[in-house]
Amino acid sequence: MSMRNKGLTAILALALAGLVLLCPGAARAAGAVVTLDQALDLALAYSPKLKAAQEALAAARFSQKEAFTYFLPTLGTSYAWKRMQDEPTVNLNGMNFQTGSLNTYQWSTYLSQPIFTGFRLTSTYRLAELGVDLAKLDLRLAQLDLVVAVKEAYLEYLRAQKSWKVAQQAVRQLKAHLKVSQDFYDVGIIPINDVLKTKVGLSSAQQEEVKAKNAVDLARSKLNVLLGRPVQEELEVKDILRYRRVEITYDQAHRIALEKRPELKALALRLEQADQAITQAQSQYYPQVSLRGAYNFTSDKPELGDNDYYDPSGWEVSTQVEWTFWEWGRTRHRVSRRRAQKRRLGNLENDLKDQVGLQVKQAILFLRESEKNIFTAKVAITQAKENYRITLERFKEQLTTNTELLDAQVLLTNAQNNYFTALTVYNLAKARLWRFMGLGRGDFPPGAGGAKTADM
């Protein structure tokens, strides 16, 4: 091969490698297996709900910046026109002298600075600051919910695949059994109705296989949507249906939940906001003081030219104190309303703590229940396999009936499905327990005793 051809080959190889790296679809088409961590990364990067929560956080930060600007002086300008009914005059020694014009035009450039607002500005800024913290908790909450949703979809996809394989195995077994039954009938060992029963059983198994395949497609589509992939795209995931025991007590889980749950932290922040809202309402009890400086151009002509009555320009400084001391109890009612809202939040916080305790308790009980079901289902599989083997051998020797063999096959299929369902439910229970404790991906309860892994 010439040097030129070698160079062209190297360039083509690099280009193809670049396409694979730049095009996720190319990598997926190559048959890459997606792990749970990779699925979570894809979902967290794609999720529209998560992006919406991020934008809400950005909006809260802009609100905080806006609230800070109210502490600062404002610079502005205004242009005003005033017309009087009569020309302004003054009487001196019985003679009237005109002191102004019917029309007055004024252009003013002013600087205004609030001095004291009854703590309204500080409470408004603190409300905005707490709003940022709340938006962060909302983002955290969206992340936790997304992690649980991805885990659920991932595990349901694995369970659907397992059920489909069990259904395919049942069809294969029944096809083999039908062949044996047909041979037995052909030599006159069994009646035709036994063959017909086997055909009916095979037909039912084939229908279940179709349902199982549809369940796989639907579960894959749900997972694809969460990962931001095309709904119909093929997806191969790593099998993580394992039993890993979690050593954690209710007291440990409850303590972690009270410390970590974003919902509880959010209510605590809302209580702080309620305090600031009360302070904001109480600001109307105090006088409002501001300082204003202005430079004015005044004339009796719109173009603000020279005139006979007004100084053409000049500056002024003024302090304004405004105090509304009677408004029919409006401020008092506003303060009372916000205090009632704070008491409402306090009651909601107590109720949420009770609900968190109940959720954790239910999750612990469900985790232990599903854990026991795994062992029961595993024993049932061993027994069902042995029962099917013995019944099949007895049927071949014509020591048992065709109906008993069909029943043994159904028992085996149900036992296998129950086992994979038990594994799925256990892992789902663990994921939901983590969510109820306020823990996200990769988090493990501190001091919970670790996790023991046992593959089942």
Image (tube, rainbow, N blue to C red):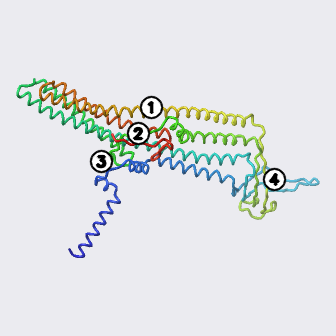
Amino acid under label 3?
Glu
Toward the viewer: 33 or 292? 33
Toward the viewer: 278 or 343? 343
Tell me the CA gap for discs 4 and 3.
88 Å
Q: Earlier in the sequence, mark 2 or mark 3?
A: 3
Mark 4 highlights which residue?
87
Tell me the CA gap for discs 2 and 4.
95 Å
Q: Quadrant of the N terminus?
A: bottom left
Q: Quadrant of the C terminus?
A: top left
Q: Earlier in the sequence, mark 1 or mark 2?
A: 2
Amino acid under label 2?
Arg
Q: Are marks 1 and 2 in contact (CB under 8 Å)?
A: no
Q: Closer to the observer: label 1 or label 4?
A: 1
Mark 2 highlights which residue?
245
Disc 1 crowd rating (10 Å Cα; few below 14, some 14-19, many 20+) is some
449 to 109, vertically: above or below: above
Q: Going by the image, does 405 lie left or right of 290?
A: left
Mark 1 highlights which residue?
365
**Most distant residue in the left direction:** 187
Q: Going by the image, does 203 lie left or right of 227?
A: left
Image coords of residue 216 (percent x, y):
30, 40
